[in-house]
Image (cartoon, helix red, strand yellow):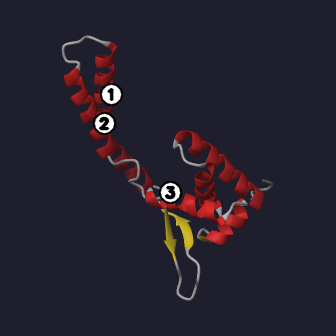
Amino acid sequence: MLGGMTTFEDRVAYADRVAGVWASRYRVAPITGRIAGYLYVCDPPAQAIDELAAALRASRSAIVGGIKVLEARGLVRRTRTAGERADRVSIVFDEARGFDPTAYLEAAEIAQSGLALVAEQNTEQRMLLEQTASLNAYLAARLPALLDDWRAEQATR
């Protein structure tokens, strides 16, 4: 990248970086991460499946499969403008994504129920379950406040 201008290759390289992180962190196929990464930086921000396939040098079926994974997670949406034959795919920004305490509450409850199975033992398993329950309950309690803090910070920008 020279002088602040980005090239198509820069954008594809970024998509590849996202793919690596998503494959290791979220256990998705690299193409899924490449699609998401490219959609974050592409121009225009909504792309047809054929455009994604050409840009990412991937098959249409691989692109469609990756999009289905992203759609199931609420990360992309398909739209179609009147008169167009192809859907366009774009990233969905949901500020509350990742801040829903439900998963953490469920994990805390599951750990608590496991504690009942080892109640009479003073074992490593008991300590692990106690820490898991405690951490997940803490995160569930703190996430709404963190989202509020972020929103307040964004309002000052």
| Crowding at mark 3 (Cα within 10 Å: few <14, some 14-19, many 20+) | some
Q: In the image shown, does 72 or 3 lie closer to the viewer?
A: 72
Q: Which residue is drawn at 29% across and 45% down?
A: 102
Side of 39 relative to 132 (left or right): right
Query: In whole angstroms, how far apart are the C-alphas of marks 1 and 3?
Result: 28 Å
Q: Which residue is identified by label 2?
A: 107
Of the numbered discs 2 and 3, the one sitting upstream in the chain is 3
- Identity of the amino acid at label 2? Ala
Q: Which residue is identified by label 1?
A: 132
Is there CB contact under 8 Å for labels 1 and 2? yes
- Say above or below: 45 vs 110: below
Side of 20 relative to 97 (left or right): right
Q: Quadrant of residue 39?
A: bottom right
| Crowding at mark 2 (Cα within 10 Å: few <14, some 14-19, many 20+) | some
Q: What label does residue 102 carry, if any?
A: none
Q: What label does residue 69 carry, if any?
A: 3
Q: In the image shown, does 101 or 122 lie closer to the viewer?
A: 122
Classify mark 2: helix, strand or loop: helix
Between label 1 and label 3, give the one nearer the viewer. 3
Query: In whole angstroms, how far apart are the C-alphas of marks 2 and 3?
Result: 23 Å
Q: Residue at x 53, y 82 (%)?
A: 81
Residue 140 visible in rendering: yes
Of the numbered discs 1 and 3, the one sitting upstream in the chain is 3
Q: Which residue is drawn at 58% across and 54% down?
A: 32
Q: Quadrant of residue 141?
A: top left
- Identity of the amino acid at label 1? Thr
Furthest residue toward front: 61
